[in-house]
Amino acid sequence: MSINRRKFLKASAAAVLTLPLAGTFSKAFAAGSSYTLKIGNSFPSAHPLNVRLKEAAKAVEAKTNGQLKVRIFADSALGSDSDMMSQVRSGALDAVCTSLLFFESLEPSANIAGLGFGYKNYDTVWAAWDGDVGHYVRQRLSKLGITPLEKPGTTDSVRLPTTCTRLRPLGISPG
């Protein structure tokens, strides 16, 4: 499998999910309890998404003094994306990293992410997804109980699209 810059940037967005939450979880686990956050995806272990998730998992575990661990299930180890979504709904899995296009059957507006020639350049892509278009799609998905990342962050001065979606609340408020 060939990995280019675009695939790398798209896949790296998931790493952003876990790092900002580390401080929140360390407060939540002050009483000494622990939790293992389980994240599944269908990308190969060597894929940049999984490389970054592993780095993020180590950082989260260190920052929470081992009270929050992140376990990554790559290579479709838990089944297809559909299988993993079912596991999220049942509570066996906490999050699944997949393409936004996966949700098209649940919410047709998610298909707008696949309009490769719908934007004249990357600046208009990021402006749309950080603006009204992204807000609309995230709002529609949220009504279905799907919680996409609002603004994943930046890497190498390039905006990253949302690729990791948390579907089941952990009962810990990120505020």
Image (tube, rainbow, N blue to C red):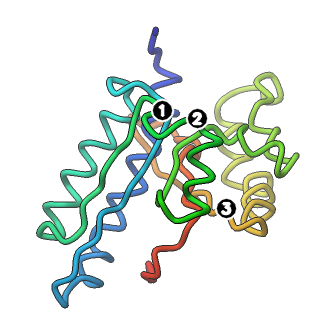
The residue positioned 30% from the left and 84% from the top of the image is 28
> For the residues marked 1 and 2, what is the alpha-carbon distance in whole angstroms?
6 Å
> For the residues marked 1 and 3, what is the alpha-carbon distance in whole angstroms?
20 Å
Question: According to the image, label 1 marks what residue?
Answer: 76
Residue 146 disc label: 3
Q: What residue type is labelled 2?
A: Ser
Q: What residue type is labelled 3?
A: Ile
| Direction from residue 62 to residue 143 in the image, left or right | right
Q: Which of marks 1 and 3 is in front?
A: 1
Q: Which of marks 3 and 2 is nearer the N terminus?
A: 2
Question: According to the image, label 2 marks what residue?
Answer: 80
Label 3 with label 2: CB-CB less than 8 Å: no
Q: Nearer the viewer, residue 135 or 114?
A: 114
Q: Which of 137 and 76 is in front in this view?
A: 76
> For the residues marked 3 and 2, what is the alpha-carbon distance in whole angstroms?
18 Å
Give coordinates of residue 108: x percent, y percent. 88, 46
Label 1 with label 2: CB-CB less than 8 Å: yes
| Direction from residue 58 to residue 10 in the image, left or right | right
Give coordinates of residue 149: x percent, y percent. 56, 58
When the figure is inspected, residue 23 is found, relative to residue 121, above or below; the finding is below
Q: How many marks?
A: 3
The residue positioned 44% from the left and 78% from the top of the image is 174
Tell me the element at label 1. Answer: loop
Give coordinates of residue 166: x percent, y percent. 54, 59
